[in-house]
Image: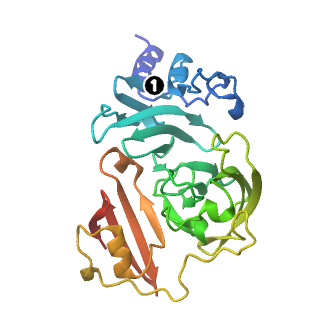
Amino acid sequence: MTLKALLLMCLLPVAGVYAAEPQATPAQCLLPEQGGTAKPGKDGSFDVEKCLSKAGIPNFNRKGKTLTIFLAGGRKELFKDVSPGREDSTEHRYTGYDPKTGFHQIEYKTTESNGLIFLDHESGFGFSSDVYAFSPDRQWVLGGGDNQYCERPMLAMQKIPARGQKGEATSAVITGKLGATDCETAIDPGALGFLFVNVNKVHWLSNEQVQIEWAGFKQGNEDLKKADAIDTTLLTLQGEQWVTDRLPFSGKQAVSKSLPNAQTPMQSGSLRTGMTLEEVEKLLGRSADRFKINPLALLGKQEITRVWTANGRQLEVTFVGGVVASWR
């Protein structure tokens, strides 16, 4: 056997270990509003994963209830579905790869929520968000608020690691009611003269400034096909928080979410496991300044770490299933 043949025999098995370079979602698997040619069914639904599989896209594999995403370096990320009807039922669908951001995208649905998971192809970093748009440098991502079922406008801004880097997503404060974390404190559409107020478009002007177009829908226009009114507001990065110029459909200046004389977080000994978020906020005197989410924790009990900062001190409280599990 020649040396050349021997080298080929050694190299072939290694080449098979690594997944092919991820491919972008083809036009036939994108809806017209996304610039594609896909045609939704009569009920308006469209199965992107099925279309990608039929197109032979090598980014993923489906075997029954297990969805496998192929990452760089031969690594894999598995998502396992849980049968419908169970309290912890979960479903995942692969919806494509975006070469511009380097993210694979997976839709997930649970008995209580649904959203998107993004996986960096190179590093495997993942986060979840109801994403509207990434900043030009991909360091910031603007999405919807915690509760997507609110009939009130809410925004959420997260800072994420650079492309190909590992790390975690951290939440940044958005001033005013636009950065609310619950339906009660968010802007009431009724006070603005609407039944619904939704984000219509997002346009990043720079890495530090983003423009949001809002659509207002009045009573009797529940089908949301055409807005009754359009308005635009601006978010600008100042320090470590995003400041809005005003509230949508209102000349009112947005009130800062941060308290001018924020109280120092209580000693951790005042906390106890099993406390609810409401009890912790009452104990500390205010809502958290930011939060961290582990997207993979969505596969089990929901886990979120809320962070309180004041006078140079930081308190991180981890909630699992809605109650305090630990802090530091």
Question: Residue 26: where, in percent of width, then height?
Answer: 64, 25
Residue that sits furthest to the top in the current view:
1
Q: Nearer the viewer, residue 191 or 141?
A: 191
Q: Is residue 305 left or right of residue 211?
A: left
Q: Nearer the viewer, residue 170 or 304?
A: 304
Circle 1 is placed at which residue position? 15
Q: Quadrant of the N terminus?
A: top left
Residue at horizontal 35 percent and vertical 38 percent from the top: 90
Residue at horizontal 32 percent and vertical 32 percent from the top: 84
Q: Quadrant of the C terminus?
A: bottom left
Query: Disc 1 residue type?
Result: Ala
Residue that sits furthest to the front in the current view:
220
Q: Is residue 19 left or right of residue 27?
A: left
Question: Residue 138: where, in percent of width, then height?
Answer: 62, 53
Mark 1 Cα within 10 Å, few/some/many (few <14, many 20+)? few
Does residue 80 lie above or below 181 as drawn?
above
Counting labels gives 1
Task: Label 1: state its secondary structure.
Answer: helix
Does residue 325 lie above or below 288 as drawn?
above
Residue at horizontal 53 percent and vertical 57 percent from the top: 145
Does residue 245 lie above or below 73 as drawn?
below
Question: Which color mode does the image show?
Answer: rainbow
Question: Residue 42: where, in percent of width, then height?
Answer: 59, 20
Question: Residue 5: where, in percent of width, then height?
Answer: 45, 14
Q: Nearer the viewer, residue 101 or 189?
A: 189
